[in-house]
Image (tube, coloured by chain):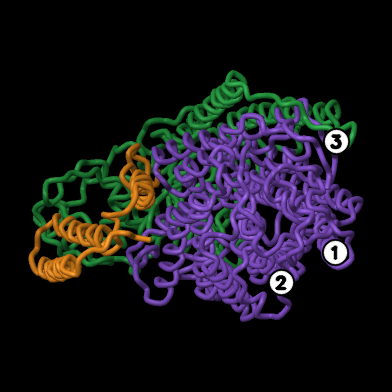
Amino acid sequence: MSAHIASLRLYWTVFALLMVMTVLTVAVTFVDLGAANLYVALGIAIFKATIVVLYFMHARWSSRLTHVVILSGIVFLGILFSFTLADYFTRGYIGVAGK
Amino acid sequence: MWFKNPFVPEQASEFASSVDTFYFFMVSVSAFFAILVVTLVAVFAIRYRRRHEHEAGTPVHGALALELTWTLIPLGIAMVMFFWGASIFFAMSKPPSNAMEIYVVGKRWMWKFQHMTGQREINELHVPVGQPVKLLVGSEDVIHSVYIPAFRVKMDAVPGRTTTLWFTPTKTGRYHLFCAEYCGQKHSGMRGTVVVLEPAEFQAWLAGGPATGSMADAGQKLFNDLACATCHRDDASGRGPSLKDVFGSTVTLAGGATVTADDAYLRESIVNPQAKIVEGYAPLMPTFQGLVTEEQLNQLIAYIKAQAGGTPGTAAPATGTPAPGAPAASGTQPSTE
Amino acid sequence: MDTATVDTRPSYLENGHSWQSWLLTKDHKRIAILYLITITLFFFIGGLFALLIRLELMTPAGDMVEAETYNKFFTMHGVAMVFFFLIPSIPAVLGNFLVPVMIGAKDLAFPRINLLSWYILVVGGLFTLGAVVMGGVDTGWTFYTPYSTAASNTHVIMTGLGVFISGFSSILTGLNFIVTIHKMRAPGMTWFRLPLFIWAHYATSIIQILGTPVVAIAVLLVALERTLHIGIFDPNLGGDPVLYQHLFWFYSHPAVYIMVLPGMGVISELIAAFARKAIFGYKFVAFSSLGIALVGFFVWGHHMFVSSQSVYAALIFSFLSYLVAIPSAIKTFNWTATLYKGSISYQSPMIYAFGFLGLFLVGGLTGLFLAALGLDVHVHDTYFVVAHFHYIMVGGSIMAYLGGMHYWWPKISGRMYPEGWAKFAALMVFVGFNLTFFPQFLLGYLGMPRRYHMYPEEWQVLNVLSTAGASILGVGYLIPMVYFTWSFVKGEKAPANPWGATGLEWTIPSPPPTENFTTTPIVTEEAYAYSNREMKVA
């Protein structure tokens, strides 16, 4: 169905980028960045996922409807995270154990 | 209630009447809407029954006004329910500062209670009438739930955390205590009795129990046996921070963040000491996860709390602020300090 | 449009009689039959466990079976009913059969994936049945941690895998429906001409696709923690047991809407057909389905009011739970208003629809009790909750499922069933259901906790009533099973449109030919355009 045919060159570029990022992920584990450790690792992972979806899964050339479908998945993940964290971050606000 | 409703459990705490009043409001509103809809359906079904086989209904076009009516009125009623329910919940969530503390530990399949004065009970809990009681709930294995229907209160006992439940008994007697969260084989056998006594009777009961020493005393013994005292000294000379007066104070952590030293913080610092390191100290402390039982953990915390004399909430009646309605209890209970 | 009567093609039932023609079929109608047989089997397994539970609870002492056995009974009852009957029931049977037909399509968008999703359900079911045969599982259908990961010594992993696998069946069915509804509507079948059954299935599919992966992950993490002792949920390994509850209910609360939304779709069809009138406030009913699907994802924390969740989170979840009640209220009022000036007949599917209205009303209203923070503290984890969700999931979903089966059975089988027996069964189910579950509301408020093998003596009377009701209910469910089977062979031949109903499914023969339509239908009118036509039965 996908009318767009991406060039082989683009695929190899994306692939190379993914490999570089993988090496980078391993590399930063050797550097202690303190609190930033988690965010750097997550940032790299999100970047990799994004280019996979955009290029390998052809989302870049897909219809608006496909974009809505992809975004809705991300939005729902956001709901799961934000509402769960809403519990964790507000625990102990009223100074009573376990409330 | 001027008559005994067989479908309502005994009202034996201050929450019972407020919960029941709310419940009757909910039942009335529900009954009104149920009867309304059922009557309309019945009336329409009879009035507009099919009279011959080829008959079709008369088209009626939707009406925005009607749709808005049956959207906004239920919404309004729902908001009343929300606020009413939330206000009761808030009252249930915040124990008064003069509440008498009792530690509860759930273990498959029994309930263990320990009073601040040291008395232990299994599957039976004695409390004085008219005195706010705060249960600090823990679990040794899986999730349990303390449920006392006559008081209309319930709180899960979550392993690894301390949770809180409070009530003021208003009527002497014996009431069911259930485990409400499924915990395995003998879940339905994990039952107990709450015995509500007159304050004087309660004092007599306390005096009659075996004198094992207060929770804080037991905690102090543990504190020495586990060699906590080697590092946590009363002055600042130890390798660990001094624990005197730490409960209720604001602690500055490595990295600059601050935290209030409450029950949860003390517990975490014992079982997972690396989670929050106090500023100026090295992360040397080993974990005591699995080395101390839930009850011992409670005793250690009680000891640390007792060292912070006068902090509201620690063994309330002993702090010298008599609980309203329970002067006898506050006057005679042994001090933990 | 009435070319149906001259159609001479073989029906989908006649088109091939070999095993392969069924087990390798790509026909959505045959796959629906495969699902029907599978989930009926699970309904009976789940029902058998329900019966055993009620028998044990006739006496306060735990004297019929051991506590451990009893715990396995209610776990297997829940797992079989929720994951292998209720979730697939209406979508996989009626939805599979009707979604393509109702929108004027030849089949679903992905016929092979459709067959695959049935096989996946069967494989998941076999894992779960395997766990039962090997000795069962005792965690409750909720698999709460750390009991499920650190304490239970039953077949948690095997059951969990069954649930995990069957989840993919649900996801693929949802995906198939969404693509079909978007891409395969007949010319003229605009979004607002779709029958409300389709809207309901569209909303359901969204939940299936977005929610199911989360429960799959939660169950997988339970299995990993049991085997590899990774510390996710067990506090002894540094995990948090409450996190599991967040993950589990993120799916499992919306899953209630997977069970009830298709039922609401069925009821909209039944009420329109037997009042011969367009559904009042069509757009409100359609959008309320989407509203439920969306807001339903924000309310899961109301299962956790006493779980040591923070007070502020509880407040948000309670508030949103009240909001999700509104679309259900809108639907109920619109159904009621549809009856006004209708031409109402009391044929058996309509009797089921009336039953649904009554039971769903009670179930929905008692949901308001549980959303109220201060009241939920008392009734949480008691029989009040048990009664509430049975009113929704059995009183609501199964009433709708049976109503739908009676309504579309002539189309599915090409045969009529005995109307008198059908009405009698509907009455038995209604009476038996109320007698079983109404006493449980009273028990719950009195404080009887759920999952109790034995209980204090003062509650025996209400428990005996409940057990008595369950036996009536059981017979009520058996009767349709018998006459449906009988009618499949011996029933009177059904005409194309026995009810004089609108909808594309009634324009083709009963049972339909494999390709459904001879030529692609062209839709020129709204759904339920009863007044535009000469009423004709047959």
Q: Position of residue C529 (x, y in %)?
A: 69, 35
Dot 3 lies on which element? Answer: loop
Q: Which residue is mark 2?
A: C15
Q: Amino acid at mark 3?
A: His
Which quadrant would residue C342 be assigned to in this image? Answer: top right
Q: Which chain is disc 3 placed on? A: B
In this view, the residue in front, A90 or B122, is A90
Pointers 3 and 2 within a single chain: no
Which residue: 11% across, 66% down? A28
Q: Which residue is mark 1?
A: C482
Colour green maps to chain: B
Which residue: 59% across, 20% down? B69
* B145 left or right, relative to C508: left
Q: Position of residue B85 (x, y in %)?
A: 53, 31
B87 w.r.t. C352: above or below: above
Dot 1 lies on which element? Answer: helix
Q: Amino acid at mark 1?
A: Val
